[in-house]
Image: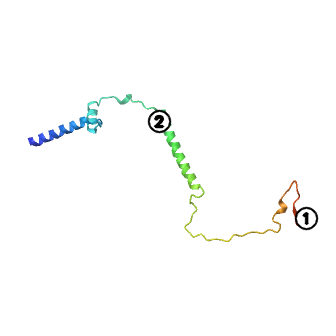
């Protein structure tokens, strides 16, 4: 029994020496709980909250959320987003050309020169 106590004490001392050489000293939860119980009569009413800053923060957070939703909606509606894509084979179709008799030349309005076709003024 004494031997186990001596070994445990030696191990703890060795760990304490190793921890003393470290530059980083974490706060342990057990130590914080002990300090809270000792200082339980500390008044926390001295802590003030800046409500305006919190309100601005929540407004910025809401605006960011709306911007994100708008961006997602725009990306869905973009051409080439694949929204109307169907997993089918594409069936090629032959182009259909319409040949007009007068090729729409009478619709051309020329200020300086008259339109001439086959030697006649149109």
Identified at 47% across, 33% down, the residue is: 51
Quarter of the image for residue 80 reads bottom right
Identified at 63% across, 71% down, the residue is: 92
In front: 52, or 90?
90
Q: Earlier in the sequence, mark 1 or mark 2?
A: 2
Residue at mark 1 to residue at mark 2: CA–CA distance = 83 Å
x and y, in percent, of residue 16 in the image: 21, 36
Residue 106, placed above or below residue 4: below
Residue 32 image label: none
Q: Residue furthest front?
A: 119
Residue 28, placed above or below residue 114: above
Quadrant showing the C terminus = bottom right
Identified at 24% across, 37% down, the residue is: 19
Q: Residue furthest left?
A: 2
Quarter of the image for residue 43 reads top left
Residue 27, placed above or below residue 107: above
x and y, in percent, of residue 18 in the image: 22, 38
The residue that mark 1 highlights is 120
Regarding mark 2 in the picture, which secondary structure is present there?
helix
The residue that mark 2 highlights is 54
Circle 2 packing at 10 Å, graded few (<14), some (14-19), many (20+), is few
Please indicate whether residue 33 sits to the left or right of residue 79 in the image.
left
Quadrant showing the N terminus = top left
In front: 4, or 96?
96
Please indicate whether residue 15 sits to the left or right of residue 75 in the image.
left
Identified at 90% across, 65% down, the residue is: 119
Circle 1 packing at 10 Å, graded few (<14), some (14-19), many (20+), is few
x and y, in percent, of residue 110 in the image: 86, 56
Please indicate whether residue 96 sits to the left or right of residue 60 in the image.
right
Regarding mark 1 in the picture, which secondary structure is present there?
strand
Please indicate whether residue 70 sits to the left or right of residue 26 in the image.
right
């Amino acid at each position: 029994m004494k031997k186990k106590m001596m070994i445990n004490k030696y191990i703890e001392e060795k760990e304490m020496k190793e921890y003393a050489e470290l530059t980083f000293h974490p706060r342990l939860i057990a130590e914080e709980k002990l300090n809270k119980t000792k200082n339980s009569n500390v008044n926390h009413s001295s802590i003030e909250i800046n409500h305006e800053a919190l309100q601005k923060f929540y407004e910025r957070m809401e605006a960011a959320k709306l911007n994100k939703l708008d961006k997602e909606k725009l990306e869905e509606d973009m051409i080439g987003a694949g929204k109307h894509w169907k997993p089918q084979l594409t069936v090629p179709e032959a182009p259909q050309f319409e040949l007009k008799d007068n090729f729409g030349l009478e619709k051309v309005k020329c200020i300086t020169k008259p339109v001439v076709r086959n030697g006649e003024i149109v």
